[in-house]
Amino acid sequence: MTTSADLLADLVADVDGVFLFSPTGSTYDDYRVIDDEPAVVVAPENDHDAERYVELPLEFDNVRDRIRFGIEGAMDHGYCAEGDVIACAVGVFGDPIDGVVRTPVTESMHSGIFDLFANSRADPNVVRDVFDVAIELGKKGQKGKPVGALFVVGDAGKVMNKSRPLSYNPFEKSHVHVGDPIVNVMLKEFSRLDGAFVISDSGKIVSAYRYLEPGAEGVDIPKGLGARHMAGGAITRDTNAIAIVLSESDGLVRAFKGGSLVLELDPEEY
Ligand SMILES: Nc1ncnc2c1ncn2[C@@H]1O[C@H](COP(=O)(O)OP(=O)(O)OP(=O)(O)O)[C@@H](O)[C@H]1O
Ligand SMILES: [Mn+2]
């Protein structure tokens, strides 16, 4: 008689590794070593002091993005390689783990999401802070009205040279870090969020209201998106900056690197 355990056994037969996504303490204690191999833990913090750990800068709501990020990070750490087959224990409908996904490790895994956080000029925590601000603005808008915004992160000197002020820069003489709680309050109070925010590698807001003037030829942006996204994409091709764009027209948060769209998130899912 076939049992449900057989179904799971088939799913995990002959895998080369097991990844635990944000495991609880008891799950980690039960499965820290499987088939004599330490499990790889993928989570925002290494709460269980796992021997093999990949930091998850955002709890990507999209499970595919989350698994891709975890596997890309694990490849980067040498915990798995192209051609391996991995069993990912993951929370599909929120916490705790409620599903197992069997996935091969292939070159196409490189969605660029890991690269966006781990291999950009800006510190990964700065990239995560900017996403948090953009997602928060996307959820709440300004005084409840949907708003768009453009954040250019890293390589600030070069970005400033390829842009000019649209109006006075409220951050001229201040030292505000994009992760400071005050930033969310400020952005809601700003009369408008025209132009781009320029943020340094370490997360200092260098300027607001910058008009970017990169070359625009050869940058593909999704149909229906206009100058804000074009400028955000193009500046990342002309500098080592990344751009995180909140669209006023469709409410999505997008990230560009090297002139390409790398990630698209819906703030409502965070
Ligand atoms: N080169 C640029 N540099 C900085 N900001 C820009 C640039 N071009 C446009 N913007 C900003 O984007 C705002 C919206 O422009 P537009 O609607 O063409 O962009 P979009 O890509 O369609 O963005 P959204 O989806 O938010 O509407 C402008 O009001 C301006 O504040
Ligand atoms: Mn528009």
Image (cartoon, rainbow, N blue to C red):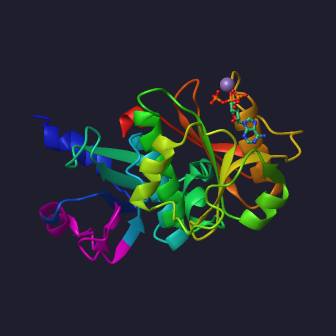
Question: Which residues are the magenta region?
Answer: 26-52
The one of 181 and 246 positioned closer to us in this rendering: 181
Residue at the image position 46 percent from the left and 34 percent from the top: 142
The one of 216 and 190 positioned closer to us in this rendering: 190
Report x, y in % for residue 160.
78, 59
Tell me the quarter of the image containing the N terminus.
top left
Residue at the image position 47 percent from the left and 26 percent from the top: 145
80 vs 207: above or below: below
Quarter holding residue 227: top right
Residue 180 as seen in the image, left or right of residue 18:
right
The one of 145 and 77 positioned closer to us in this rendering: 145
Instruction: Count the labels in the image.
Output: 0
Report x, y in % for residue 74.
47, 65
Tell me the quarter of the image containing the C terminus.
top left
- Residue found at the far top of this picture: 224
81 is within the stretch colored magenta: no
